[in-house]
Amino acid sequence: QVQLQESGPGLVKPSETLSLTCSVFGGSISGYYWTWIRQPPGKGLEWIGYIFNSGSTNYNPSLKSRVTISEDTSKNQISLKLTSVTAADTAVYYCARDRDYFHYWGQGAPVTVSS
Amino acid sequence: EIVLTQSPATLSLSPGERATLSCRASQSVSRYLAWYQQKPGRAPRLLIEDTSNRATGIPARFSGSGSGTDFTLTISSLEPEDFAVYYCQQRSNWSPFTFGGGTKVEIK
């Protein structure tokens, strides 16, 4: 059974870069789509984007100018970077497997943007 | 971007009752719609994909229907563990994937 675990700083200052890592256990990241989704406090879900085979990415147009998703196959990890953050980026960030519908999810990493 | 509107925002029901949740899309998504269940402090769980296909391990009391712009999730007889928030999600090829705003199913 594949398991996903997000990690990273829980507090980021405005205008800085949010960086999160998703570690995958119980299977290789190769050959699968890996997606990031976020959920602001008390609100709904927002699709951020996905990566496939390290080179193929697709991002939400609303975030595209600030987002980078990458893979490290040697560590079996997926990474998310979001630049120039504001308070509106405060959310729980989830990594999930698959492109279209998300069968496996991590437990989520809460990130607060505040000075 | 395709907007998904879920109704009602809150559904107050008793265990054993039938729950009917609605999701309406701003334009056709064919049958490319999924449903998720989320409990407090937990990640969402996939229930239904492509309108009516239950994900692995999902009980038969959960069923989905619809096409185009109007979709329904039905829980035939609510169990205590079914009280949660439910989200729909579309995977159209010409729009970023989007989720509905959610329906909370609460105990009456």
Image: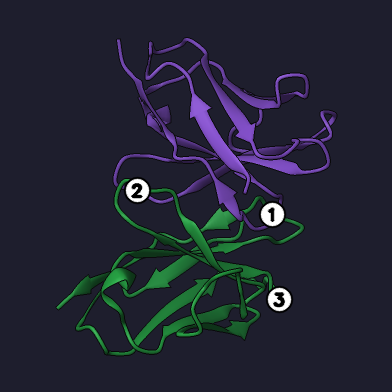
Q: CA distance from mark 1 to mark 2?
A: 21 Å
Q: Which chain is purple?
A: A
Q: Residue at x 42, y 16 (%)?
A: A9
**Residue A105 spot, x, y in % from top left:** 54, 46
Q: Residue at x 37, y 48 (%)?
A: B42
Q: Is residue B37 visible in the rendered structure shown here?
A: yes
**Mark 1 Cα-neighbour bin, 10 Å: few <14, some 14–19, many ≥20:** some
Task: Name the residue tied to disc 2.
Answer: A43
Q: CA distance from mark 3 to mark 1?
A: 13 Å
Dot 2 amino acid type: Lys
The first of marks 3 and 1 along the sequence is 3
**Residue B98 spot, x, y in % from top left:** 57, 55
Classify residue A10 by image quadrant.
Answer: top left
Task: Between label 1 and label 2, give the one nearer the viewer.
Answer: 2
Q: Chain of mark 3?
A: B
Q: Is residue B26 visible in the rendered structure shown here?
A: no
Determine contact: label 3, label 2, CB under 8 Å: no
Dot 3 amino acid type: Ser
Task: Name the residue tied to disc 1.
Answer: B95
Q: Residue at x 66, y 50 (%)?
A: B96
Q: Chain of mark 2?
A: A
Dot 1 amino acid type: Ser
Q: Chain of mark 1?
A: B
Task: Name the residue tied to disc 3.
Answer: B30
Report helix, strand or loop for mark 2.
loop
**Mark 2 Cα-neighbour bin, 10 Å: few <14, some 14–19, many ≥20:** few
Q: Colour of chain B?
A: green
Which residue occupies the foreground of this view, B101 or A102? A102
Q: Is residue B44 above or below residue A109?
A: below
Report helix, strand or loop for mark 1.
loop
In the shown orientation, is residue A89 left or right of residue B34? left
